[in-house]
Amino acid sequence: MMAQILNGNPSPFGRQDAARITTPAGSTIEPTSDGRYQVCDARSHCRRADNLWEAQQLVQWAEVHHRPVDSDLP
């Protein structure tokens, strides 16, 4: 996946708005008010993650396996 450069920093996930990360495939990661992360795919299937690393792993797994982020992990 090709990274975009925003404010001089490459983003491994593509476009970043202030608090939202959007991948080229349309998945998003957003922080929530409780300190967790909301992960959604392009079809609006969503799931919560406890930390950013977990959120990134959910997105990567879902996009590689062409599965919704709210599906069960293997």
Image (cartoon, rainbow, N blue to C red):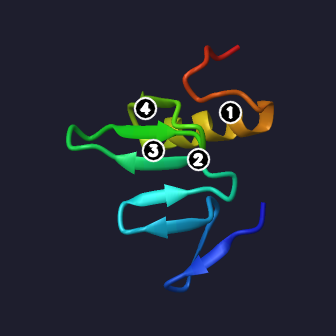
Which one is in front in this view, the residue at disc 2 or the one at disc 3? Answer: 2
Q: Secondary structure at mark 3?
A: helix
- In three-dimensional space, the C-alpha distance between marks 4 and 2, rounded to whole angstroms, equals 14 Å
Q: Residue at x 38, y 31 (%)?
A: 50
The residue pinned by badge 4 equals 49
Residue nearest the viewer, comparing 3 with 46: 46
Q: Are marks 1 and 2 in contact (CB under 8 Å)?
A: yes
Name which residue type carries label 3: Leu
Q: Are marks 3 and 4 in contact (CB under 8 Å)?
A: yes
> Is 1 positioned to the left or the right of 73 in the image?
right
Quadrant of the rendered structure where residue 37 is? top left
Badges 4 and 2: C-beta atoms under 8 Å apart?
A: no
Mark 2 surroundings: few (<14), some (14-19) or many (≥20) residues within 10 A: many
Q: Residues within 10 Å of mark 4 (few under 14, many from 20)?
A: many
Badge 1 marks a residue whose secondary structure is: helix
- Residue placed farthest to the left in the image? 33
Which one is earlier in the sequence, the residue at label 4 or at label 2? 2
Residue at image mark 3: 52
Left or right: residue 37 versus residue 7 is: left
Q: Residue at 68% of width from left, 33% of height from top?
A: 62
* Quadrant in which the C terminus appears: top right
Label whose residue precedes the other's in the sequence (2 or 3) = 2
**Mark 2: secondary structure:** loop
The tag earlier along the polypeptide, 1 or 2, is 2
Packing grade of label 1 (10 A; few <14, some 14-19, many >=20) is some
* Residue 45 drawn above or below residue 24: above
Q: Amino acid at mark 2?
A: Ser
Gap in Å between the C-alphas at discs 1 and 2? 9 Å
Q: Position of residue 8 (x, y in %)?
A: 54, 86
For disc 1, the marked residue is: 62
The answer for how far apart the CA atoms under marks 3 and 4 are is 7 Å
What mark, if any, has residue 27 been given in the picture?
Answer: 2
